Amino acid sequence: MAETKPKPKLNKKAVEMAKQEPKVRAKNFSEVALGYTEAEAQEEASRCLQCPNPQCRSGCPVDVPITTFIKCIREKKYAEGIATIKTKNALPAVCGRVCPQEVQCQAKCVIGKMGEPVSIGRLERFLADWERDNGSQLPPKAPATGKKVAVIGAGPAGLTVAADLVKLGHEITMFEALHVGGGVLSYGIPEFRLPKAIVQNEVNYVQKLGVDLRLGNLVGRIHTIPELMKDGYEAVFIGSGAGLPQFTGCKGENLGGIYSANEFLIRVNLMKAYLFPEYDTPIRMGKHVVVIGGGNVAMDCARSSMRLGSDVCLLYRRSRDELPARHEEIENAEEEGLVCKFLAAPLEFFGDEKGWVKAMKCIAMELTEPDAKGRRGVKEVPGSEFTMDVDTVIIAIGQTPNPIIQRTTGGLQSDPRHGTICVNEVGKTSLDGVYAGGDVATGAATVISAMGAGKRAAKAMHEYLTNKK
């Protein structure tokens, strides 16, 4: 009787990825996570069970063939692996860094039921970084269709639509209001989480596919959608994001030293205020900074402020259990010195004789019973007011879309409460040939959800253009 070889023991623990030490990284803007070495990627890839019906793929908003690219890593076929990812995802270096895999693909990993799931995002990043070091290969393109498409916004949704449609043979022009491409990837996510060189490399890839990127073009001012369609564009995709900040409405909110998260992050990231005076954009950062909010944007503001030399307190009106930020970002921020004050909200801001904020009155909050959806509300605790000394306040409680496109495009239906453009399940708006996706249609959400919306819209737009006479 033939001897049966014992099955290799399943490693239930994921391979850790090296990071800068907290005390070091809290004083610089270099990338925190350092990525896998080849040996580490091989070891982590070996944990994948290569399921015949992989559930991880069903958790990916852009339908990346996950087990296939992981198998390529195991076999050291790195060029084939990154090509596999790019059949579905034009921005793997971005997604490998900022995508919340823990609640998407990795949440469905079979090994995750027995131990830690396979680190899909870290393996995706490994392949993307390998490609950047070794050169990229452009995929084949379909013959030219003669159809022109305008894409508004060079953020994650717009880049995805542009990449998908140009590969199908359409002529794509992308209009971007800012002086660089990338959208929120460039202005909203700090260098230490997503280096700008990585973003521009991804933007360059989309341009190499044949997309015409026109910077400094604010649609709604320089051109309107009706004008673009008169100029020969047969379809338009709106991916202009959600760049209009929300405020607390508290008295004194217009004092100097109080920033919206948008303004603060644009100054720090896109205008390189963290390198002042080498770059000529200053930003006033006092010793005591309070960041109001609890999402990923709030964490980005808090961690950036600490790197600029401030002591930072995060003020969040719910408890730690309700923090919407990724667990990894909360953990990193606290390792770097962030102090959190939960169940508290601002009431009023006070200024000095020069008009700069110097203090804020707050009130304690308490959680209410969960509603029908399981979400707990909050209410003020009477008589619990307290005052905090502050030098700088950053308000990170959400963003809504800029209404300029809606106001300059007759017949484009939008939500009067949230300002988002109304779309169906594939991104079609109320206007024939006009589609939208990402934050402009959903409100502020994740990069990968915007990309998923872009992929659905691209497919629908291709069918529309193909059938259009």
Image: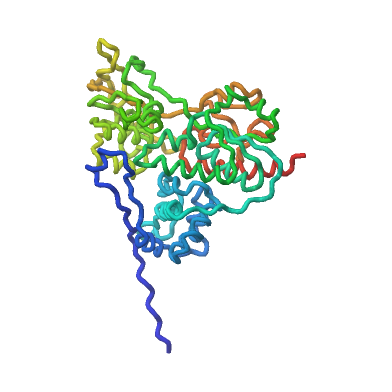
Asked whether 461 or 233 is in front, the reply is: 233
Relative image position of residue 61 (x, y in whole percent):
51, 47
Residue depicted at 45% across the width and 55% down the height: 134
Residue depicted at 37% across the width and 72% down the height: 8
Is residue 4 placed above or below 212 in the rendered structure? below
Relative image position of residue 31 (x, y in whole percent):
33, 44
Relative image position of residue 334 (x, y in whole percent):
26, 40
Q: Quadrant of residue 117?
A: bottom left
Q: Quadrant of residue 377?
A: top left
Dividing the image into 4 quarters, which one contains the N terminus?
bottom left
In the rendered view, does 2 fall on the left or right side of 84? left
Relative image position of residue 109 (x, y in whole percent):
43, 57
Q: Is residue 353 visible?
A: yes
Q: Is residue 341 visible?
A: no
Residue depicted at 61% across the width and 36% down the height: 173
Residue depicted at 65% across the width and 47% down the height: 168
In the rendered view, does 178 fall on the left or right side of 339? right
Is residue 50 placed above or below 414 in the rendered structure? below
Q: Quadrant of residue 198?
A: top left
